[in-house]
Structures are given as structure tokens and as C-alpha cells.
Image (cartoon, coloured by chain):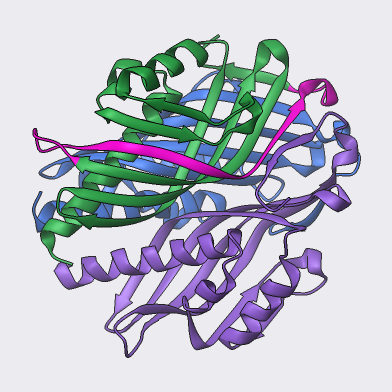
Chain colours: A green, B blue, C purple
């Protein structure tokens, strides 16, 4: 591994970190810039009834903008990257734990998954996500009605 | 990005990791060494009634020493750093998930946040935290009375 | 820190990430390759009645193969590495949060710990785990009977 390879690893990690932050901070325009124009996604989340597959940056971002509004709190925490770089292309796996809280419905969804991503270095020199998808290790849902003492003491979107 | 920049990223990440470990392991003297003498903090945790703002390494550490004793279990897990280095100064964001358990009160507090930190390379060559603060994505609290079967099977501080 | 040291840090992080993924994906043969032949472990998990100490790659992997079958969902999320490299040997701490779900018994075990690992660069040039162990910050268990609405909506092993 040489300096060029180390820098690519840093840049790709940061790209993924930025993607995850933009999702949870609902920064949809900035999120778009982390994806290639032809990016594809495959979120294997069965709670939505079927895997969520999208083609193209706009479709991905439109889905999130429409479905992850201020009525939904999301937290995506991913780490443990294993990234292989080959010139201007790269693949990587990440371990994810996520939690989604819908206070209005008093519902919590939580789970874990492994991402399998592809990255591409674009003409402007920046790495972007060309494909992101994951397979769930598990996903669970429960109602806050089972926890009558549960109180949200902070909600960035309320 | 050159070798010097890569090394700075490694050193700043390790600094933050050490800070987080010292908080959860209640190593207050070692924690002090992760902060500049004039470090400031701004923990936006509303459960304490107001944001927790401190000025100076001693004030920060004194607060933790006084409020995070053996009756409190804390777990801070932060990752997804996005760090910009500019000479001997740097800024960085991190994603946090944390859990606090107060067994004596049968209370759990958990949540997520994004840190916004500033770092400074000191005269001894070591990086230290000049400012750390976060904005909550959410914070929630509940009583273990809602989960009668809940048992602590290990507690480092008991 | 020079290029050689930076590369070692990348390789050791990736080794640990691979180890953690292999545990949660139940890839026992690949897991074996992350360990030195004489690797030792010391998982300080009191819920099993006593610390889990094993000697030798085969004993470690046999235990996992026998005890973490498809009836158990495990999620190990570790980060915040603090790694010191000295030639072909290294030591490192990591912060862990883990969750174990046994759907058949309707039991959840969750907790946090700090790993203290030793790594060794082997004759083939690859780093492997020579020792891994952790001390629990806390561990808790509860029954899903306390949460009647809890439903697994995905389980990779079902």
C-alpha cells in the first residue's frame, strides 16, 4: 500500500461518513453530491414490504426527501470498513446499526446490516457512491406503548 | 493530502478515541490531558435542564468527576469523523450514540448527536481538544420499571 | 509516524473489522484465518457464568461454531481503536457495543466493553490476532415478554 492508496481510503471513508450524516441531518442537496448521477441503491429493509431499489441520484434522494421528513428521527451508525481500491474504482463493506423513531406513531424500528458498496472517482477528482446496498442481519420493530415511561427529551426535528 | 496530513488525521482520531474511553472508564486525570488548558465544551443535553457549557480543562473534568461517579454507567460510541486540518488547527464532526444507565434510579437515557469539535496541536507536539460540543438528533429516557425482567449481569462500577 | 506505520494501522484495523464481520456473519472458516494458530481469548462475559477463555485458534472457533448457530443473532460494533505498533507486534484497545438476540428464548443480551488485543505480523506478511479479550463496562439481559409488541421483521438466519 502506498501513499496514493492510503489517501484513497481516507477519502472513501469520509465520503461514506458524509453520506450517513446527510441522511440523519436530512441534508438532501448535500446528500445528492455524495452519489454518482447513475448511482443505484438496494436497501434490504423488509419492514417496507420489499427491498428499496432505486436507480439514479435523483430517485434515491427524492425517496429520502419524501419519506424521511421531520416526523421521522433516523440514526445510522456504520463502521468497520473493509475497502479495496482498484484505480478509480473501489468496493467496500461496512457494518451498520440503525434506529428509526416515529414519535407520532409511537413506533421504533431498529436493526443491523452489512453494507456492500461500490465507489467511483469522478472527473472532478472526488470519490462518489456508485452503489450502496445492504443485507439485514436483523430488524425489529416495537411500539412505545410497551414502555409507558418513555419520553423524548430532545428531538432535532420537533 | 500528504504524509503529514495523514498522520495528523490518525493522531486526531486517536485523541478523540482516548477522550471517549477516558469518559467511560472514569479516568479523569488522563481525560484532562486530552484537553487544552482553555478547552470549552457545549454538551447540548436538555435532560440536564440546560446545555452543559464549561470553560477550561479543570471545569470540564471537575463536572465529570462530580457527576459521573460509580453510580452511573456511561457508554459513548462515536465514529464517522470528517476532519479538516489546517496547520496546527483542525475541526471535525463525529456521529455519537450514547447510553447512560443509573441503576439506583432504574433510569436509562439514550440518544444520538453530532459533535462539532476543534483541535489544536500544542507546544509538546500533541493534538488536544480545544472545543467539543454536540447537537442532539434525539434523546430519550425511560424507566426500567417498564421492563421488569431487566437485569444488569455486569457492571464495572458495582 | 512514517508510511510503514500508517499502513500497519490500516491493516490491523481491517483485520479487526474482518474478525467482527466473520463473527456476526457466522463465517467460521474465514474467522479462523484472522487468528494466529496460538491465539488466546478472554471474553469477560459473566452471563455465561465465567469468563470465556480459550487457547488456540481451533478452540476459539469451535466454541463459536457450537454456540453461535442460526438460533442466535449477534451484532458486534467496535470502534475507537488506539493501536501501538512495534515492529511485527502491536497492541490495541477498542470500544465495543454488542447485542445478542435469541428469538427462540425471547431473550436479549446487550452491553458494552473495551477490548484489549494483541496482534502479530505472520510469516505470510499478514497481521493476525494473537490475543483478544475485553472487560465489560456493563451487560444487561431482558425478556421480550416485557415488550409484547416486539416483532423481528428480518432475521438473516431464520
Q: Is residue B56 above or below residue A68?
A: below
Relative placement, left or right, of C54 versus B117 is right
Q: Is residue B61 above or below residue C64?
A: above
C45 or C72, which lies in front? C72
Q: Position of residue B155 (x, y in %)?
A: 73, 56
Tally of marks: 0
A92 or B48, which lies in front? A92
Quadrant location of residue C121? bottom left
Instruction: Determine the residue positioned at 63% across, 80% down.
Output: C60
Q: Is residue A31 above or below residue B93?
A: above
Q: Is residue B88 in the magenta section? A: no
Q: Is residue A122 in the magenta section? A: yes
**Magenta part of the protein: which range?**
A121-150
Instruction: Determine the residue positioned at 71% across, 13% down.
Output: A105
Quadrant location of residue C70? bottom right
Instruction: Determine the residue positioned at 27% across, 83% down.
Output: C87
B147 or A136, which lies in front? A136
Q: Position of residue C89 (x, y in %)?
A: 35, 82
Q: Quadrant of the N terminus of chain C?
A: bottom left
Q: Position of residue B38 (x, y in %)?
A: 30, 37
Quadrant location of residue C9? bottom left
Relative placement, left or right, of C19 versus B72 is left
C46 or C150, which lies in front? C150
Q: Is residue B98 visible?
A: yes
Q: Position of residue A154 (x, y in %)?
A: 58, 18
Q: Is residue B41 visible?
A: no
Instruction: Determine the residue positioned at 9% across, 34% down.
Output: A123
The secondary structure that most of the magenta stretch takes on is strand
Q: Is residue B101 above or below residue C71?
A: above
Amino acid at each position: 500500500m502506498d501513499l496514493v492508496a492510503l489517501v484513497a481510503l481516507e477519502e472513501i471513508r469520509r465520503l461514506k461518513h458524509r453520506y450517513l450524516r446527510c441522511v440523519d441531518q436530512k441534508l438532501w442537496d448535500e446528500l445528492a453530491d455524495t452519489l454518482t448521477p447513475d448511482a443505484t441503491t438496494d436497501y434490504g429493509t423488509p419492514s417496507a414490504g420489499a427491498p428499496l431499489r432505486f436507480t439514479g441520484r435523483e430517485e434515491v434522494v427524492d425517496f429520502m426527501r419524501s419519506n424521511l421528513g421531520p416526523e421521522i428521527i433516523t440514526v445510522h451508525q456504520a463502521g468497520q470498513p473493509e475497502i479495496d481500491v482498484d484505480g478509480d474504482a473501489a468496493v467496500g463493506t461496512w457494518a451498520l446499526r440503525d434506529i428509526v423513531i416515529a414519535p407520532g406513531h409511537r413506533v421504533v424500528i431498529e436493526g443491523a446490516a452489512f453494507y456492500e458498496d461500490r465507489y467511483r472517482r469522478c472527473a472532478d477528482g472526488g470519490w462518489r457512491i456508485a452503489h450502496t446496498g445492504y443485507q439485514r442481519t436483523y430488524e425489529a420493530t416495537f411500539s412505545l406503548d410497551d414502555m409507558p415511561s418513555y419520553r423524548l427529551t430532545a428531538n432535532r426535528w420537533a
